[in-house]
Image (tube, grey):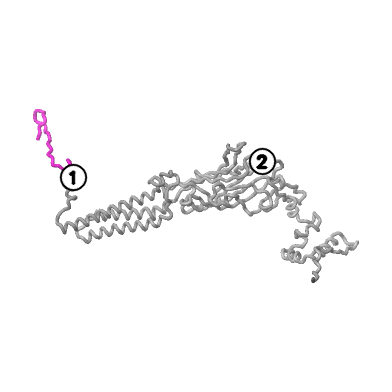
Amino acid sequence: NASKPPRPPLEEKVEIEIDEDDSEEERNRVARSKKVDKYPGAEKLGVAFGRNDYLLPENFKTLRRQDIPVTYRLHDDLLRKGTRPVKHPNQLVHVSMSVFLYQIIKLDAVKNTISLSGSFELYWKDDFLTWDPKLYDDAKEIFLSSLDIWIPEFSLYYSHNFNDAVKLLSNNDVRVNYTGHIRYYIPFSTESLCKLDVKFFPFDIQQCTLLFGSWAHSNDSIKYSLYTQNLSLIDFYDNQEWELDTAHSNIKADGFLYDYLDPPLFWEMIIMDLVVVRQSFYYVFNLVIPSTIITLVAVIGFHTPSTSGRVRDAKFRLGIMTLMSMSVILLAIVEDMPKFSMWSSRRGRGSFSGIPLIGLYYFILLAIIGLSTVTTSMFVFLERDYRVKRRIPWYLRWLAFDLRGADPGLQRSTSYNRAPNGHGDDQTT
């Protein structure tokens, strides 16, 4: 068997020649230089970042505590990731927050969802992240990674995306004060379920309620509250289709009592009520007005008198072209128009009660145009039939003479007026 080469030692002892006349600073410098020779990569990294090699975290164990930078010392002393930042299990963690709304991205009437973007600023106190600034060169704040400390669980209920429903998190660092107060910033872009009422589409007003809270912690462990009682719209961007009704939109801290548990527990939640109004000018200008004009043209063409067969055929073709124009307009809105209103009952979804307003409008227009086209075609047929047979069909004679002739209003009647005579009596004339 071939002999294996000897394994290199994991760490070789560095022998440092120290003169008794050298100062302590000189001795440390010589020791650091010997250490750098053993780690050439550390030397390159230190030069690349413009700092000495002894500032690298892997070399902190060879330095005295006062030689380690304050930021690294604070990081090592404070990082104690636990379950909750309280000293007693029954102690509450008070989490206050500010809510900022940036934009209402989309309301999907087919999926019944609302997409929006915004941010949360969470504030709470961690009893374990405290220190004396005098021991750390008067350092009063430090930034820590949100993955290394305890973060309150904060989720969106009734989320359309499962990842948002699990937990709202951010990779941003947290700002920690020496008193233990923490500030955490969570930007979000989410899609939540919203029951849309499109019965009056496109003149509808929608109200969506978003619930934020914890899945596991009730009010005996975490209590949520609002730092500012109003929804912040400082950086809000308007939507082209929807307008936020700021007078009726609000945010509040409330919760729900689960009385079926033993003992009953109360879950704290942040409730965001958003009221949005659809901008209907686009639908009125591009769909409602053109459809109305087309219908008026069809009705006017139906009442236009005709003197020849070609003109009568043109009236019939006008009705067909009008129906085709309405079909093109319907194809343009059929993808955006909701099928029925979610607020209607399940039985009502198969009737006119669940159809949006614009759907009923187009149904009436199509009925008017279709009726005028069918009537025009009947008149053309009857006129051509009369030219060939020279007689009126029996059903028209029955309709015009027998049925209408029996109407008392068509019978000839004589009216008599009574004029007063000289004696004051009425005289029939």
- Classify 10 Å Cα crowding around label 2: few (below 14), some (14-19), many (20 and above): some
- In the rendered view, tell whether residue 358 sits above or below residue 260: below
Q: Which residue is mark 2?
A: 92
Q: Residue at x 41, y 55 (%)?
A: 334
Q: Residue 331: image x %, image y %?
A: 39, 57
62 lies left or right of 121: right
Circle 1: element type: helix
Q: Residue furthest right?
A: 20
Q: Residue at x 36, y 53 (%)?
A: 289
Q: Residue 216: image x %, image y %?
A: 62, 44
81 lies left or right of 407: right
Most foreground residue, 347 or 15: 347
Location of residue 94 (image quadrant): top right
Asked whether disc 2 touches disc 1, contact meaning CB atoms under 8 Å apart, the reply is no
Q: Residue 412: image x %, image y %?
A: 13, 42
- In the rendered view, tell whether residue 166 sits above or below residue 421: below
* Magenta-highlighted residues: 402-429
12 within the magenta span: no
Amino acid type at circle 1 is: Leu
Q: Which residue is mark 1?
A: 403
Circle 2: element type: loop
How far separated are the C-alphas under marks 2 and 1?
A: 88 Å
